[in-house]
Image: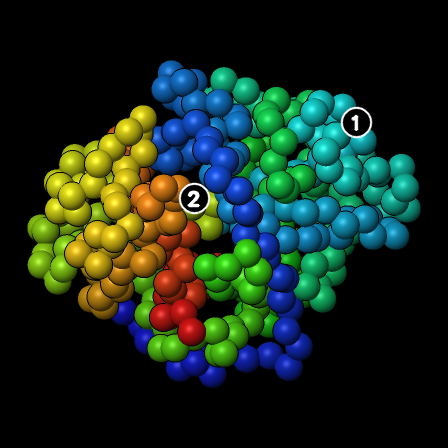
Amino acid sequence: MKCIVALLALAVMAQAFKVPLMKRKDGGRKYPYVDPGLKFQSAEVQASYGATMMSLLFQGYYYGAISIGTPPQSVQVLFDTGSSNLWVDSVYCNSRACNVHQKFNPQSSSTWQPSGKTFTLQYGAGGMTAYLGYDTISLGGLTVTNQMVGLSETLNTAPTPFAGIVGLAYPQISSSQQPTLMDTMMQQGVLQQDFVAFYLSRGQYGSEMSFGELDSSKMASQITWTNVISESWWEIMMQGFQINGQETGWCQQGCAAIVDTGTPGLAVPSTYFSSLMQSTGAQQYNGVYYISCDQAGNLPTLTVVISGVAFPVPPSAYLEQGQNGYCMFGIQPTSQQDFSGRPMWILGDVFLREYYSVYDRTYNRVGFATAA
C-alpha cells in the first residue's frame, strides 16, 4: 500500500462546518477496567468477559453538541468513529442515566416523524432500548433533514457526561440498519467532500471536529493517507511498531488497527503487551500500569509506522498524571481480534491527540497529519 500525500490546501472551504468538543474531566475518578477491544465484539463476548455498559461507555472522552428537531433542542453527544448508531436520551427514559441530562422531547418538535420501530443495543451485561424516528439534525452550521434517530427508552448504565452517541463508522455495523449521520449527509449532498476530521487537544477545551473541511491551522505537516481494509470500522494496516526507534518485528506481516475517537488509550495485542511494559519498567496494580513521574524522562518513544511513514508517540502522550507522584499509562492490552481473526490494535485518543485525523468516505481512507 503506497501512501498518498496531500497538500494542506486540500478541501479548504469558505464556510467552516466545525463542532467544538470538550474533553471529559474525571476529577481523579477511576472506572472499572475493561479490555478496550471488547467494544468491537458482540454483546455475548462482552458479557463473557464481565464487561458492563458502564465500563464500555465510559471509554469515551470527547463530546460536543448537536441540535435535534424544530425548534432545535441541544444535546451533548459522543462523536465516535468506533460505532455507527445515532441515539440520544429522551423523555421516554426515566433511568438515573437519562435523568441527569437534558432529554430530547419529540412532542416539542414539529419535524419529528415516528417510524413505529424500536431497536436494542447490547453493551455487555447491560444495554438500551430505543424508539426510532426521523428528525432534523443541526451541528457545526450544517442541517440534515429526515435523519433516523434512536430515542432512549431504557438505559442501564451510570450517568455519563454525554446524553447520546453519534456513530461515524460504516453503516455495515449499524444496528437495525440505521443510516449513519454521515450517510445521510452524503445522500443529501450537504458536504463539498465526504469526510470528517478531528483535532483532539490535551486540555479540557480546544478540541474540534469538522465535516467536509480540513483546518490547516491544526496541522503541522502534510497528510499521509492509508486505505481502509474493512468497511466496517475505520480499520487500517500498520507496517511497523518501534520502541525508541528500534523495530520490534511485531508487524512484519502487517498489523490491523482500528482508529477510534471513542477509545481513550492505545491498545496493544496481549501477545506483545508484556514485552512493551517491560521496556518501560512499568508496575501494575488492579489492571492499571503506572510509574513514578520522576522516571518519565527515561521512558521510550513508541512509533507506529503507517504507509511507510513514522508516527512517534512520546511518553508525554501516553502518560497521565496520577496521584502521589505516580503517572498512569494510557496503554492497555487487548486479547480481541477483528472480523478476519487478526490481532487487534486500537489507535485511540493517546495517538489521536498527537495527530490530526481525517476519515474519508469518498476514497475509503484515513489521513494523519502532525497536530499543530
The residue drawn where x is 59% and y is 57% is 21
Observer-nearest of 82 and 206: 206
Residue 79 percent across, percent down from the top left = 56, 50
Q: Residue at x 25, y 53 (%)?
A: 294
Q: Is residue 78 visible?
A: yes
Graded by Cα atoms within 10 Å as few (under 14), some (14 to 19) or many (20 or more), the crowding at tag 2 reads many
**Label 1: few (<14), some (14–19) or many (≥20) C-alpha neighbours in 10 Å:** some
> What residue type is disc 2 on?
Thr
- Residue sitting at 32 percent across and 58 percent down? 316
Label annotation for residue 92: 1
Is residue 342 at all visible to an observer of this figure? no
Answer above or below: position of 1 versus 340: below
Q: Residue furthest front?
A: 324
Q: Please state which of residues 334 and 30 is positioned toward the viewer in this rendering.
A: 30
Vertical order, 58 against 75 (above or below): above
**Residue positioned 55% across, 56% down in the render:** 204
Q: Is residue 41 left or right of residue 163?
A: left
Residue 322, given in percent of the width and then of the height, sits at 39, 44
Look at discs 1 and 2 and give the one toward the viewer. Answer: 2
Q: Quadrant of the N terminus?
A: bottom left
Relative to residue 200, is residue 100 depicted above or below? above
Residue behind mark 2: 263
